[in-house]
Amino acid sequence: MKIKLALIALVTVLFVSCNSTKTAVDGIEGRTWKLKTLEGKDMTNLKLEKDVFFMLNKEESRVNGFSGCNNMMGTYTLEEGNRIKFSQMGSTMMACPDATFNERDFLEVFELADNYTITGNELSINVGRRAPLAVFEAVDVKE
């Protein structure tokens, strides 16, 4: 009887701990994150054909998005404590001579980022403990 109770307690602890870790990670993956601020500057009134955004694909550990003129892509890893690392980042190479948005500044966020925070529908991508590199808002995908 004691063995059965111990086994039930162990399974319960494992189930609860796995679910709590999964919930923390699920908040950032599988959502479309639209750029709100970049290095503290408001980016909500950009005059672009498409919103600047990114998404994390959980099944493939891939990141993709739109950086103002070009599509971007790469890979990512998530770790405990809201740690994130982007790697193998790249983008298409379309020329945008009339660009009003500096894509390089946006793409640099993914090179520097090492952690994130989520508050409601808002995501901050950070490096260390300084002010956010960029702040994003969760949005519905427009088809």
Image (cartoon, rainbow, N blue to C red):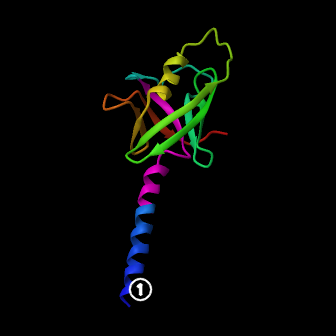
Residue at 35% over, 87% down? 2
Residue 23 visible in this rendered orientation of the protein: yes
Q: Residue furthest left?
A: 129
Residue at 59% across, 13% down: 99
Looking at the image, the residue that sits furthest to the top is 97
Disc 1 is placed on an element classified as helix
Q: Amino acid at mark 1?
A: Lys
Q: Residues within 10 Å of mark 1 (few under 14, many from 20)?
A: few
Residue 78's x, y, as percent?
48, 44
Name the residue: 38% across, 91% down: 1
Q: Most extreme residue toward the front, as rendered?
A: 3
**Where's residue 6, x and y in %?**
37, 80
Q: Which residue is mark 1?
A: 4
Would you place residue 13 above or below residue 73 in this image? below
User: Residue 115's quadrant in the figure?
Assistant: top left
Q: Residue at x 49, y 51 (%)?
A: 26
Please tell me whether residue 101 belongs to the stretch shown in magenta. no
Residue farthest to the bottom? 1
> How many numbered discs, if any?
1
Residue 79 in the image: state x and y as whole percent: 44, 45
Q: Is residue 122 left or right of residue 61?
A: left
Is 20 inside the magenta-drawn segment? Answer: yes
Residue 50 visible to an observer of this rendering: no
Query: Which residues make up the magenta segment?
Result: 19-38
Residue 71 appears left or right of 9: right
Position of 21 relative to 31 (above/below): below
Does residue 28 appear to the left or right of 61 in the view shown? left
Q: Position of residue 48 (x, y in %)?
A: 59, 21
Quadrant of the drawing holding the C terminus: top right
Q: Quadrant of residue 126?
A: top left
